[in-house]
Amino acid sequence: MAKDKDYIKLIHTPRWLRLRHDILTEHPLCERCEKEGYVSSATEVHHCTPVECGVSYDEKRRLMYDPLNLMALCHDCHVKVHTEMGRSGKEATRRRNAEHVASIIKKFFCD
């Protein structure tokens, strides 16, 4: 589960729940499994560019609700995608946090 407070707030909004429902209705099968020639039900919606990558709340909100940033996946594929992205485990969390701090410093304190 994500620990970003903005993400947690956004993921519990009626707007997200409607969008998630719409994505799963539009893509009832896992998009990754389909590409690999398998058929499985999509049960989760993945953000291709993680919401936490947004530096400001507005950027996070844009990433959260952008339908082009979403992919319908089964649970197993969702776990695989996050593992492949290096987004699971304590080391990945430390690295992500350091990158986030660096991006904020760059955006607000560098020329």
Image (tube, rainbow, N blue to C red):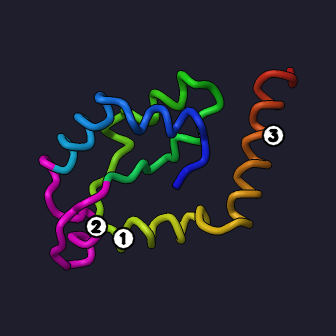
Residue 48, disc: none
On the image, the x and y values in percent for residue 18 come to 23, 34
Prevalent SS, magenta region = loop
Question: Which structural element holds mark 3?
Answer: helix
Q: CA distance from mark 1 to mark 3?
A: 30 Å
Q: Does the magenta run of residues contain 24?
A: no
On the image, the x and y values in percent for residue 35 come to 25, 70
For label 2, the residue is 74
Cβ atoms under marks 2 and 1 closer than 8 Å: yes
Q: Amino acid at mark 3?
A: Ala
For label 3, the residue is 102
> Mark 1 Cα within 10 Å, few/some/many (few <14, many 20+)?
some
| Relative to 27, 10 lies left or right | right
Q: Residue at x 81, y 40 (%)?
A: 102
Q: Residue at x 36, y 30 (%)?
A: 13
Q: Amino acid at mark 1?
A: Cys
For label 1, the residue is 77
| Relative to 97, 54 lies left or right | left
Q: Does the magenta run of residues contain 33?
A: yes
Q: Amino acid at mark 2?
A: Cys
> Mark 3 Cα within 10 Å, few/some/many (few <14, many 20+)?
few
- Check the image and name the residue furthest to the right: 110
On the image, the x and y values in percent for residue 70 come to 34, 46
Q: Nearer the viewer, residue 105 or 90?
A: 90
Q: Which residues are magenta?
A: 25-44
* Number of the front mark, 2 or 3: 2
Q: Residue at x 33, y 68 (%)?
A: 75
Q: Quadrant of the C terminus?
A: top right
Answer with mark 1 or mark 3, whichever residue precedes in sequence: 1
- Tell me where residue 31 sits by quadrant: bottom left
